[in-house]
Image (cartoon, grey):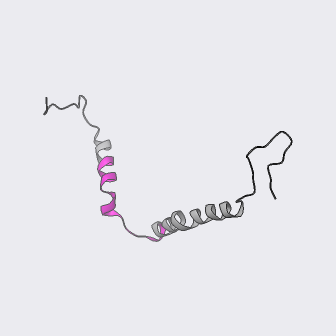
Amino acid sequence: MAGLQHHKVAMDPAFVRLNNMQVNRYKYFRWTPRTGFLTTLYVFVIPGIVGYIGWKWDGAWDLRAKRRGDLLAER
């Protein structure tokens, strides 16, 4: 049973080409202005914005041991 093929239906050539393209994508990558912009955006800008928001709002809310009528805001 070691050599038994389990593909009962023919493979779709479009899916085979798509899989080959995704597997070999790193071979055909080129730095363009668009890829440079997107890399900068996803590596620096978005994490920086999320970090700034987290730093700015750190300690603004206290959700522990609150009873009815207590305020959530600490500031």
**Quarter containing the C terminus:** bottom right
Q: Position of residue 46 (x, y in %)?
A: 58, 62
- Note whether 7 is above or below 31 in the view shown: above
Which residue is most to the front? Answer: 65
Q: Position of residue 26 (x, y in %)?
A: 33, 61
Pick the residue in front: 10 or 55: 55
Pick the residue in front: 26 or 75: 75
Question: Which residue is depicted at the point 30% across and 56% down?
Answer: 24
7 sits left or right of 22 in the view? left
Q: Could you tell me what secondary structure mostly forms the magenta stretch?
A: helix
- Note whether 28 is above or below 18 in the view shown: below
Question: Any magenta on residue 24?
Answer: yes
Image quadrant assignment for residue 4? top left
Please give the count of numbered marks on the rendered protein: 0
**Quarter containing the N terminus:** top left
46 sits left or right of 13 in the view? right
Question: Which residue is depicted at the point 52% across and 63% down?
Answer: 42
Q: Position of residue 58 (x, y in %)?
A: 70, 60
Image quadrant assignment for residue 30? bottom left
Pick the residue in front: 43 or 34: 43
- Note whether 72 is above or below 32 in the view shown: above
44 sits left or right of 55 in the view? left
- Magenta range: 18-34
Q: Position of residue 67 (x, y in %)?
A: 81, 40
62 sits left or right of 69 in the view? left
Question: Which residue is depicted at the point 67% across and 63% down?
Answer: 55
Question: Any magenta on residue 64?
Answer: no
Question: Which residue is depicted at the point 28% across and 42% down?
Answer: 13
